[in-house]
Image (cartoon, grey):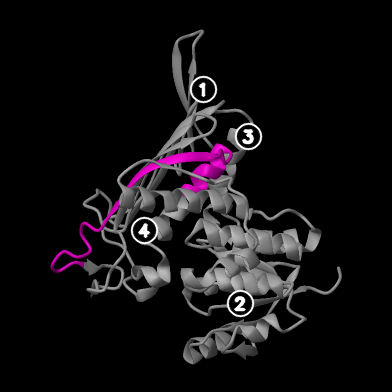
Amino acid sequence: MSKPLKVAIIGAGGIARTHVPGWQASPYTELVAAADPNPEALSEFGRRFGVERLYPDAGEIFADPSIDIVDICTPNRLHAPLVLAALEAGKHVLCEKPLAPTPEEIRSMIAARDRAGKLLMTAQHFRFKASSQAMKREIEAGALGDIYHARAWMLRRNGLIATPTFIRRELSGGGPGIDIGVHILDLTLWLMGNPRPVSVSGVSRTALATHDGAWAVWQDTPIPKDFDVEDFAAAFVRFENGASLILEVSWLLHHDTENEDMQLWLYGTEGGCHWPKCEIYQTNYATRQLYNRSLRLTKDSMEPHAAECVAFAKAVYEGLPSPVPAEQSLQVITILDGIYRSQKEGREILLDSLAPIVPIEVMRAAA
């Protein structure tokens, strides 16, 4: 094997630390640098993972010709400018979810990716769980037939991180829709085969976060008064192939769960299924029998955040397609953006998920 690919991480906070084991486990990569404007976080990251090249300015990473891959683990609103800068500097890019809070930003990333001829991937780690991979194989083998309806939710009873990067729209781009909705929606669309969404009717509201005494149980702290995103969102989505989807997400909900309830159901012409139980439900019409079967699952061979990094490194090294194409992330964000628009306008929104990708130079000129 030729020399390993050099990796640099931008953003030395909590999520970056789940990526490091993947870069360290891959035979194709070597983690050599990190950047973060917070000197304490950057220094601690360097000590913990043995990274010596530490920069307060991400520009130094882009200017380093030895860096092959940039892993972006920053607040949501910083994703787009950093991804664009990395691609324009000739780097392959793995970016934490959401790839960007708006469809327009993702279109600009796709255009930059194509100009650079590099790989771009969104870190959607639930795709890399053993249960998700097993269900995907069953669906591709025809166990469900044509999928025509889905139900999906990711609901927390009282679970959020009450820091500005999550609860301030200027940094996050949204609340649980952008934060956790992106997880369950991406997984559902991927299992459905990523049909093209054509319309969404949605609601998003702040129902409990501003309640007197509301608190973030994960930190055991009061929810700040500058909370300005939704705490609940729901939608009905139609697809070009006639399929439909009901989606519900929340950080705060009077729901029967102690922590988090993440489920999806798919219904097809030959069967249905549930994830994460990984059960398949089918009918024998000749014998008038209903039967269920459970998939025999192996344990995750690697924590999914690490596994996604290993998969991306392999794709870069071997010249394979991106494991999570940006076009699929564009579908996800087009739907989530449609929910916010639907709430604002009080009507069903027709989606332009296949609108032409606008070059970033044109967007800048228009701005």
Residue drawn at (24%, 49%) of the image: 255
Which region is colored magenta? Answer: 185-214
Mark 1: give few (<14), some (14-19) or many (20+) Cα within 10 Å: some
Q: Is residue 311 above or below residue 184?
A: below
Mark with earlier residue (3, 4): 3
- Determine which residue is flagged by label 3: 140
- Determine which residue is flagged by label 4: 176
Give yes or no for contact between labels 3 and 2 (Cβ–Cβ under 8 Å).
no
Select label 3 or label 2 by which is in front: 2
125 part of magenta stretch? no
**SS class, disc 4:** helix
**SS class, disc 1:** loop
From mark 1 to mark 4, how far is it between C-alphas? 32 Å
Q: What amino acid type should be assigned to the residue bearing mark 1?
A: Thr
Q: Is residue 136 above or below residue 221?
A: above
Q: What amino acid type should be assigned to the residue bearing mark 2?
A: Ile
Mark with earlier residue (1, 4): 4
Mark 3: give few (<14), some (14-19) or many (20+) Cα within 10 Å: few
Lateral position of residue 148 relative to residue 222, left or right: right
Name the foreground residue: 292 vs 93: 93
Query: What is the x, y in percent for residue 311?
Result: 67, 59
Is residue 18 visible in the rendered structure shown here?
Answer: no
From mark 4 to mark 2, how far is it between C-alphas? 25 Å
User: In the rendered image, which quarter contains the N terminus?
Assistant: bottom right
- Determine which residue is flagged by label 2: 9
- Determine which residue is flagged by label 1: 269
Q: Name the outermost residue toward the top.
A: 286
From mark 3 to mark 2, how far is it between C-alphas? 35 Å
From mark 3 to mark 1, how far is it between C-alphas? 14 Å
